[in-house]
Amino acid sequence: MQESSTTRLSPLELSAWAGFLRAHSALVRELDRELETTHGLPLTQYEVLLRLDAAPEKRLRMSELARSVLLSQSGVTRLVDRLERQELVVREPCAEDRRVLYARITGEGRRRLARARPTHLAGVRALFLQHFDEDELRSLAAAWERLQPAASA
């Protein structure tokens, strides 16, 4: 009896999916190692600082921050706790809704992000981008864009 397409991936599908997972895991692990070793800043903390720095007024609601860095509410709370202890982020109450808390990047957080950014970008280029020409990068960008509606479902 032949397996249906609902119970098994084809060899091509499996190769594409498993390759994506392996590449993602290896890239994130190495980028995290570089940031941690060079700046004492894990990739997840870098990502939070990056999101806050890019946000209007340099702050986001904790719930928005959790969604933007793909962490649970409790996960982002613990991460912001650590960043707050390092004085890289502060929490601020919302004047209009007392249930809402914002996380805001501090001046020290912005300086730390600025020091770490060249390391991170060099890593992204060396570990990922340099392996593709411009046409391949355009194709990859288009492929990731097609996945956006599915990823937000």
Image (cartoon, grey):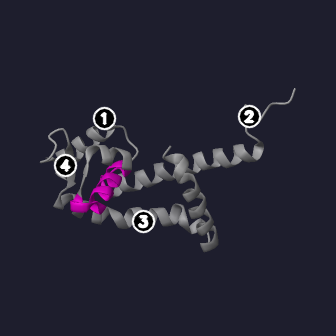
What's the amino acid at mark 3?
Leu
Position of residue 87 measured from the top left corner of the image (x, y, whole percent): 16, 51
Observer-nearest of 4 and 26: 4
As drawn, the residue found furthest toward the bottom would be 134
Write the residue at 28% across / 60% down.
Answer: 55
Contact (Cβ within 8 Å) of mark 2 with mark 3: no
For the residues labelled 4 and 3, the Cα–Cα distance comes to 23 Å
What's the amino acid at mark 2?
Arg
| Position of 6 relative to 37 (above/below) | above
Pair 3/1: label in front = 1
Contact (Cβ within 8 Å) of mark 4 with mark 2: no
Instruction: Give whichever of discs 4 and 2 has the lower sequence position.
Output: 2
For the residues labelled 3 and 1, the Cα–Cα distance comes to 29 Å
Residue on which disc 2 sits: 8
As drawn, the residue found furthest toward the right would be 1
Instruction: Give whichever of discs 4 and 3 has the lower sequence position.
Output: 4
Pair 4/1: label in front = 1
What's the amino acid at mark 4?
Gln
| Position of 62 relative to 119 (above/below) | above
Q: Which mark is residue 74?
A: 1
Could you classify mark 1 by the number of other residues whose Cα lies within 10 Å: few (under 14), some (14-19), or many (20 or more)? Answer: few
Position of residue 72 measured from the top left corner of the image (x, y, whole percent): 36, 37
Residue range (magenta): 39-58
Q: Secondary structure at mark 4?
A: loop
Residue on which disc 3 sits: 121
Instruction: Give whichever of discs 3 and 1 has the lower sequence position.
Output: 1
Please name the predominant secondary structure of the magenta segment in the image.
Answer: helix
Q: How many labels were placed on the picture? A: 4
What's the amino acid at mark 1?
Ser
Q: Is residue 52 left or right of residue 127?
A: left
